[in-house]
Image (cartoon, rainbow, N blue to C red):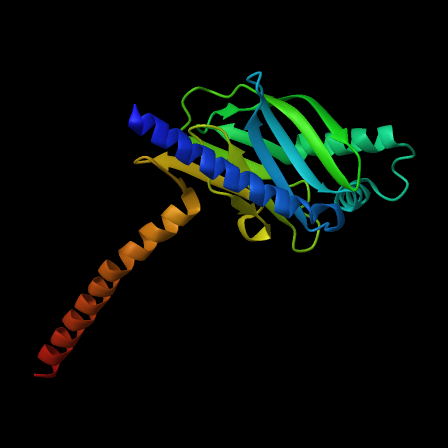
Amino acid sequence: MAYEVSMRCRTGLVEGCLLFLLFVSSMGLAHNPDVSNCIISKTEKGQIILQINSSLTAFKQEVVFRNGEGSYKSPEEFRNLVLNYFNSSFSIIINDKDTLQFKNPKVFLGHETKLVAEITGLPKDIHTIHLKNELFKNIYKNQSIVLFLLAKLPTEKYTLSSANHHQITIQFNNGNWTELEKAEKKSLLGFIPYLIIVILASFLIYLIRKRKKNI
């Protein structure tokens, strides 16, 4: 019982810190087109919600880049273009097979513009998460912060940028969530000592054979 209470307190503290960081970062979103965030959370009614926040300028730049100047004449037309772009530029795949669906996506315009949608199809057991967000990929030096505010999902924030092609793959292994690319790099680094040994052994064999020929 004491362990459960401790875990709940720890989870609440982590979520509180993440929300505080989110609040601080969102203060700069309204006027900063190269920064955005993507939050996946759960409502009191049990709905899983996706929320993408960035400046109105960022959304406008991407819509114009994709559709050209004069591509919309009203806020409603602008919203529809944003949603069309969202449908082709954002995806979440769970366990390498389950592509999540986004129900009733809506765009709320403002200095800080929000795209909100309900997520459906989230399986009970989650082993890998592949998230791609190319909504702002054409904005120079764009960075998108990803936050999962759901139980059993990563509490660490992740950054999408051109360096990782605006996508991440996260894997649950031995009780921890790890970015797959980082795990692969770590595995390759662990292989380097063995590679050095093989090279040195080959060089030594080469020297021995060369010496025998000279004799």
Where on the picture, by quarter, is residue 105? top right
Image quadrant where one finds the N terminus: top left
Could you say where residue 187 lies in the image, as x and y percent from the top left? 32, 50
- Looking at the picture, does residue 34 appear above or below residue 8? below
Where on the picture, by quarter, is residue 51? top right
Q: Which residue is at a point 55% across and 42% down the rendered structure image?
A: 167
Could you say where residue 125 lies in the image, as x and y percent from the top left? 40, 22
Q: Is 210 or 131 nearer to us in this picture? A: 131
Where on the picture, by quarter, is residue 81? top right
Could you say where residue 82 lies in the image, as x and y percent from the top left? 76, 34
Q: Which residue is at a point 77% across and 31% down the rendered structure image?
A: 108
Q: How many labels does the image show?
A: 0
Q: Is 33 or 14 nearer to us in this picture? A: 14
- Looking at the picture, does residue 47 appear above or below residue 173? above
Q: Is 138 or 120 nearer to us in this picture? A: 120
Q: Is 138 or 122 nearer to us in this picture? A: 122
Is residue 211 shown left or right of residue 184? left
Q: Which residue is at a point 80% across and 34% down the rendered structure image?
A: 109
- Looking at the picture, does residue 49 appear above or below residue 113? above
Image quadrant where one finds the C terminus: bottom left
Residue sitting farthest toward the top: 45
Is residue 15 shown left or right of residue 214? right
Is residue 64 shown left or right of residue 150? right
Could you say where residue 123 lies in the image, as x and y percent from the top left? 46, 20
Q: Which residue is at a point 20% across and 64% down the rendered structure image?
A: 197
